[in-house]
Structure formats: structure tokens, C-alpha cells
């Protein structure tokens, strides 16, 4: 350094600045292509990072949509992004152009969890052989879950009984239902992945739940966006383990469970659950080097199912109970239908749904109104494509604004109100709606949708069969305005559950 004079240093700094500007221009040149979607002007290096409020990204996105239309572009540092809004654009991108739009952007921040070419899990797997293999495996394991001794529906019904007992133990006193719902839904995933449930005070379950909440917080905000956009920062020693300590601890806890399970696997017996079925595939894959069935991937697949399947479903149920205490007339009509179809004794089964159009409409409307994954999970184009006449080059990150579909003013009669009639015809029959897209659509749509629907219907119906829910006396009416942190959750609230 001593050899560099002040003049040489200045020359070096100018050269470096010019070099960086050129690299920046190279990344931005895509914006000048014909028919590239319009968008706010990006700053050198940072792009539009500072123009988005990552504490409430959906709000920023909706404001930009008003300025630039249904298909607009952003630049997150050097990553080009196109945002798709409204039923028409989202459907065209996901369904019509599904072959071009089903890749996932590389997420540098997950490397520290073991994510790499040989182990990609399902949710973030690149669109290709490993994803196809793992998606098929998870879907068929979920579908054939007569694997163990009990069907998944029986697991859910049994868990619903445990949940009702825990609600009853509150003895009509005010409580926040979120924790108990988290525990019940986690047990359904645990039954799928590990063939077991946990008592609600089991320290392993309590630890998993706490770590999932911490991990979710670590996933949102400016820091992970900046680290993904500028992955070189992740090389700063100790940074990843400090910023993502919750995620690492969550994986370590799941690892313990998987190890315990591997040790108790008896290959002579049929698989007890998804983990056993995966271990069998690992054995078969020993002669197939291209296979994605390996121990590193097992932990990622299990983590994916836990994280994708738990918080989503329990958050939706938390919304469902909130909306019932805010709309007692809807709650009464659901209970009336339950009394007519099931009575007080018989527990609900999925087959009852066909005879319970009002309850089915309410569950759908809860999902539409709650809108819990407003921006979906990012996709990426795997080749040049076109949406609504705009050109989107290969390698562009896509944000699918599911919220803009679930609340599309051109489709829904009262998009911003809780209105179960959205799913009922004049005769009170249930009607499907194309813009009902809480699970997204196309090749990457939620693979847990059948399980989630089963849990929502059975837990919700069991709870309303057994209890009437109300705002605790003397407490203000809770707000139905959600809080965003990747998922949209209701602000913490309390209710009273009085046995019927
Ligand atoms: C109410 C509950 C749920 C909601 C609202 C929901 C929503 C979603 C959404 C919006 C996506 C992204 C789709 C896309 O990229 O286009 C997704 C993906 C996924 N979900 Fe769900 N989900 C729920 C429950 C579940 C459950 C119970 C499981 C598993 C047991 C699950 C497993 C997954 C997986 C593995 C993916 C990644 C699929 C892929 O990339 O191919 N989800 N979910």
C-alpha cells in the first residue's frame, strides 16, 4: 500500500467506480429491451431496494401496480424482477406459460443450511429432475398415506379431539388460540414425517415451534433481501450463523429427530411414515448417481414440509376463529349447518363437506380474506417468455401477487370484506371460483393443498361443533387487519371458547 501515492489511489478509485458502473449498466441493459415491463427507475448498484418497504412489501407492490399496471419490473440490486398482478396476468404466467415460469431463483441465504446442487429440498429446488423427483415423492406419499396404520384423515380427526380437549381446559377463560393451533397442526405434519404426535407440553414440540417463529422472522425484511441480492456479503465470517441462528437451530432439532428415526428403522417392516419411505428410496438410489434421494436431502425435504405445512395452516385457522368472533351471525349459521348434518355426537369426515355448502364457503372465504401468502413464493423464468404482451427474459425473478387475485376488484363482489356469499349461488350451493388462488396455481402450486384443505375443514368443523367463540367480555373488538412478515397473521387476540 505504501507504494501507492495519493494520485495513484485516486486513479484506482475512479477505475473501480467506472468498472462497477459498467457492470451495473450491463445488469440493467435488459430494461431497455423492447416490450420489457415498465417500472421505477433503479439506483446504481442498489436498484430499487430502497424504494420498497420490506416491512410491508405487499403495500409497496400494490402502490407500484397503481402507477405501472398489472405487469411491472423492479431491480433488486442486480436481480431483475417482474411483478405480476391480477387474475389474468397471474393465470397466464403460471398456467399458460408454466413451462417457462416454474423455476426458483437461487437463494444464497440457504446455503448455510446445506442447500446445494445435490440437496435442494422441494420448495426452493430448481425446476428440473431433482424437483420433479421430490415433488412426485411428497405428493404420492401424502396421497397414499395409508402407509402407516392410520390414514391421514384419522390422524387429523384424532388430533382435532386433542385440540378440543385443550380448548376445553381453558374453562371459558380468555386465551390466544394461536399456540394450541400451532401444536395441533405440527402434530399432523409430525404424524406424516415421523409417524408420531407430541403431547402439547413436550419440550421438543415447544422448541420446534419457537424456532419456526424465529426462522420466519429471519426470512423477512431488508437483511435477507440484501444478502440474497449481494451474496458475496455472506462470505463475511460468522455473518450467516449470527443472522440465521434460529434457522440453524431448527435444522439441528429436525436432524435429531431424523437420526432417531433412522436408528429405529426396520427395513423388514413396511414404512411407518414419509421418513421411512424416503430412507427406502435412499437405499434404492445407491445405484443411481443422478438420484436426489440422499441423507442431506431428507433433512431439507422434512424441513420444507414442516415449515410450509405448519405455519400456513395454523395461521389460517387463527384467522378462521378471529373471523368467527367478529362475525357471530356467520358462526351461528355454520353451527346450524353442523347441527343439521352431523348433530352433536358424530365427528366430521371429509365426505360431509359435500353436504355442508355454507361451512365450505366460510372456510374458502377465510382463506380468501386472510390472504396469508400475499406475494407467493418467488418464481424465476427458465427461458424467455411473454406475459400480457410484455417480454420477460430468461433468469428474471417473478413475484406472483396472489393477493391481487384473491382481492381482484374485477372478480369479487366485495373484495375487501369477509363475505362467504362469494362462494355461494342464489340457492345456497357452493360455487368454485377461478380467482380462489391461496395455494397459487400451475406446476409449482402448493403440493400440500389436499392436506391443508382436510385440516382446515376438520379442525374448523370440530371446533365449531363443540364450542361457541366470542370476544372476551370487556375487551375491545380485535382488528381484522393482518401483520405482514412473509405470511400475513392476525394481530394477537384473545377469545373465549364456551362449550355448546
Ligand atoms: C393453508 C395452508 C397452505 C397455504 C395457504 C399454502 C400456500 C402455498 C403457496 C402459495 C405456495 C407457493 C406456490 C408457488 O410457488 O407458486 C406453496 C408451496 C408449497 N407448499 Fe403450501 N400451503 C399450505 C399448506 C401446505 C401444507 C400442509 C404443506 C405440506 C404438508 C405444504 C407444502 C408446500 C410445498 C412443499 C410447497 C412447494 C411446492 C413446489 O415448489 O413445488 N403447504 N404453498
Image: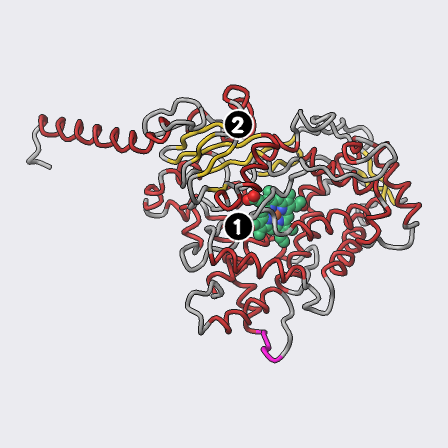
Mark number displayed over residue 168 = none
Q: Is residue 42 left or right of residue 322?
A: left
Above or below 1: residue 144: below
Residue 31 x/y as whole percent: 37, 28
Specify start and end residues of the magenta stretch as a single range.
264-268
Q: CA distance from mark 2 to mark 1?
A: 23 Å
Residue 240 x/y as whole percent: 40, 46
Residue 419 x/y as whole percent: 77, 30
- Is disc 1 placed on a helix, strand or loop? loop
User: What residue does disc 1 label?
Assistant: 123
Residue 484 x/y as whole percent: 58, 33
Q: Does the magenta run of residues contain 179? A: no
Above or below 240: residue 88: above
- The residue under the point 44% across, 74% down is 287
Above or below 273: residue 129: above
Residue 211 in sight in this render: no
- Figure quadrant of the N terminus: top left
Magenta segment, principal secondary structure?
Answer: loop
Report whether the residue tagged 2 is closer than 8 Å to ligand 1: no
Q: Is residue 8 left or right of residue 376?
A: left
- The residue under the point 55% across, 20% down is 66
**In terms of depth relative to the viewer, which is nearer, 475 or 6?**
6
* The quarter of the displayed image where residue 70 is located: top right
User: What residue does disc 2 label?
Assistant: 61
Q: Residue furthest bottom?
A: 268
- The residue under the point 78% across, 50% down is 458
Q: Residue furthest top?
A: 67
Amino acid at each position: 500500500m505504501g507504494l501507492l501515492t495519493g494520485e495513484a489511489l485516486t486513479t484506482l478509485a475512479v477505475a473501480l467506480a467506472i468498472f462497477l458502473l459498467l457492470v451495473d449498466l450491463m445488469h440493467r441493459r435488459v430494461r431497455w429491451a423492447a416490450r420489457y415491463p415498465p417500472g421505477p427507475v433503479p439506483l446504481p448498484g442498489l436498484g430499487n431496494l430502497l424504494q420498497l418497504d420490506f416491512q410491508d412489501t405487499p403495500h409497496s407492490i400494490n402502490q407500484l401496480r397503481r402507477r405501472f399496471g398489472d405487469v411491472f419490473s423492479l431491480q433488486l440490486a442486480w436481480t431483475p424482477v417482474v411483478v405480476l398482478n391480477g387474475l389474468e396476468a397471474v393465470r397466464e404466467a403460471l398456467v399458460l406459460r408454466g413451462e417457462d415460469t416454474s423455476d426458483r431463483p437461487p437463494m444464497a441465504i440457504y446455503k448455510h443450511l446445506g442447500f446445494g446442487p445435490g440437496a435442494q429440498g422441494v420448495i426452493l429446488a430448481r425446476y428440473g429432475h431433482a424437483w420433479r423427483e421430490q415433488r412426485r415423492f411428497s405428493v404420492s406419499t401424502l396421497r397414499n398415506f395409508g402407509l402407516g396404520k392410520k390414514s391421514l384423515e384419522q390422524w387429523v380427526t384424532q388430533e382435532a379431539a386433542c385440540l378440543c380437549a385443550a380448548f376445553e381446559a381453558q374453562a371459558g377463560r380468555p386465551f390466544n388460540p394461536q399456540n394450541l393451533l400451532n401444536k395441533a397442526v405440527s402434530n399432523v405434519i409430525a404424524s406424516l414425517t415421523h409417524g408420531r404426535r407430541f403431547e402439547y407440553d413436550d419440550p421438543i414440540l415447544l422448541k420446534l415451534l419457537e424456532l419456526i417463529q424465529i426462522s420466519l422472522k429471519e426470512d423477512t425484511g431488508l437483511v435477507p433481501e440484501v444478502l440474497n441480492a449481494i451474496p458475496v456479503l455472506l462470505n463475511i465470517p460468522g455473518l450467516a450463523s449470527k443472522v440465521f441462528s434460529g434457522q440453524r437451530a431448527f435444522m439441528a432439532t429436525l436432524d435429531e429427530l431424523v437420526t432417531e428415526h433412522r436408528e429405529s428403522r426396520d427395513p423388514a417392516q413396511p414404512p411407518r411414515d414419509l421418513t421411512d419411505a424416503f430412507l427406502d428410496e435412499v437405499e434404492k438410489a445407491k445405484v443411481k448417481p443422478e438420484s436426489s434421494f440422499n441423507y442431506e436431502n431428507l433433512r431439507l425435504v422434512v424441513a420444507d414440509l414442516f415449515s410450509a405445512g405448519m405455519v400456513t395452516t395454523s395461521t389460517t385457522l387463527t384467522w378462521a376463529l378471529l373471523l368467527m368472533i367478529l362475525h357471530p351471525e356467520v358462526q351461528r349459521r355454520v353451527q346450524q349447518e353442523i347441527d343439521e348434518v352431523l348433530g352433536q355426537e358424530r365427528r366430521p369426515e371429509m365426505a360431509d363437506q359435500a353436504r355442508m355448502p355454507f361451512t365450505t364457503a366460510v372456510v374458502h372465504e377465510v382463506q380468501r380474506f386472510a390472504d396469508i401468502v400475499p406475494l407467493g413464493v418467488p418464481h424465476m423464468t427458465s427461458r424467455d417468455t411473454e406475459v400480457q404482451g410484455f417480454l420477460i427474459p430468461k433468469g428474471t425473478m417473478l413475484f406472483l401477487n396472489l393477493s391481487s387475485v384473491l382481492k381482484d376488484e374485477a372478480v369479487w363482489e366485495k373484495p375487501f370484506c369477509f363475505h362467504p356469499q362469494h362462494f355461494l349461488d342464489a340457492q345456497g350451493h357452493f360455487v368454485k371460483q377461478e380467482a380462489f388462488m391461496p395455494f397459487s396455481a400451475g406446476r409449482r402450486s402448493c403440493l400440500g393443498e389436499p392436506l391443508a384443505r382436510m385440516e382446515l375443514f376438520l379442525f374448523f368443523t370440530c371446533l365449531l361443533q363443540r364450542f361457541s367463540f366470542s370476544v372476551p367480555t370487556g375487551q375491545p373488538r380485535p382488528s381484522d387487519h393482518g401483520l405482514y412478515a412473509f405470511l400475513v397473521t392476525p394481530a394477537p387476540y384473545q377469545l373465549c371458547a364456551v362449550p355448546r
